[in-house]
Image: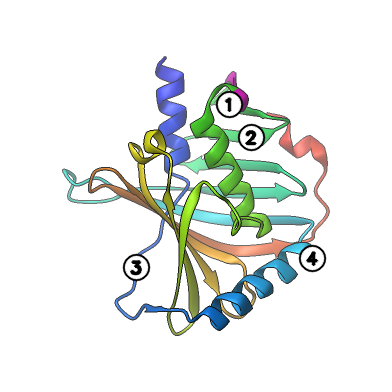
Amino acid sequence: MRTKIYLFAIILNLFAWNSSAQEQKMSDGEITTFKQSVNVVSKKIKTLSTDFVQYKHLDFLSKDIETSGKMIFKEPSLLQWQYKKPYNYTIVFKNGKILINDEGKKSAVDIGNSKIFGRINKLIVGSVSGDMFDDKEFIISYFKSKNQNIAKFIPKDVTLKKYIKQIELTFDKEDATVVQVKLLESSEDYTRIVLKNKVINAKIDDSVFTN
């Protein structure tokens, strides 16, 4: 039970972004153009690796909890999140399972046994591959700022809403890839993660996703 609770907390912590007061709603034409540009770029991405810094905001703490590591994606749906500081913790999404390595202690969770994990996994992979805009599980709205485009996802499922109030994916206008994401929980807590040093289409062996 402790492992499942911890896993869910880690998955929640995969999301983050600081919202900007300069956001404006996109027009229908801008939404169409934005979605097309993301889809064009995502079709060219076969692999992606990026460093990340994650900030967990808890209302009762004066300072955010900071962790960092590396995320690696390989099409169609291999995904690894490797936390390196201040602890070693790896999560791999592979073949319908979530593989966990907690500093050498290994375990696995079948995504098919949890609708919530399944939906989150689909959105995580979609945020990397660009295939997330037609997800009927969410109400999606679109915004823009000077250098970024933002897609906000509100869950339709009542059960999922108990854990996730809203997910925000932020895309760089230049390359149409995700640069930041934010997860707002049902409380006032949130998590933000910053992606940097992206490397696209470098050779990545499948063995990387062996946890």
Residue 92's tag is: 2
Looking at the image, which residue is at 61% across and 56% down?
Answer: 134
Label 3, on which residue?
19
Q: Position of residue 76 (x, y in %)?
A: 77, 47
Label 4, on which residue?
44
Name the amino acid type tagged 4: Lys
**Mark toward the viewer: 2 or 1:** 2
In the image, taking residue 205 as reference, residue 18 lies left or right, namely: left
Q: Distance between the residues labelled 2 and 4?
A: 23 Å
Q: Position of residue 173 (x, y in %)?
A: 57, 79
Q: Which of marks 3 and 1 is nearer the N terminus?
A: 3
Q: Residue 50, can we see it?
A: no
Q: How far apart are marks 3 and 1 (CA)?
A: 32 Å
Looking at the image, which residue is at 75% across and 39% down?
Answer: 208
Q: How far apart are marks 2 and 1 (CA)?
A: 9 Å
Contact check, label 3 and label 4, Cβ < 8 Å: no
| Secondary structure state at the residue bearing disc 1 | strand
| Neighbourhood count class around disc 3 (C-alpha, 10 Å): few under 14, some 14–19, many 20 upward | few
Label 1, on which residue?
101
Name the amino acid type tagged 2: Val
Contact check, label 3 and label 2, Cβ < 8 Å: no
Count of numbered circles on the image? 4
| Secondary structure state at the residue bearing disc 2 | strand
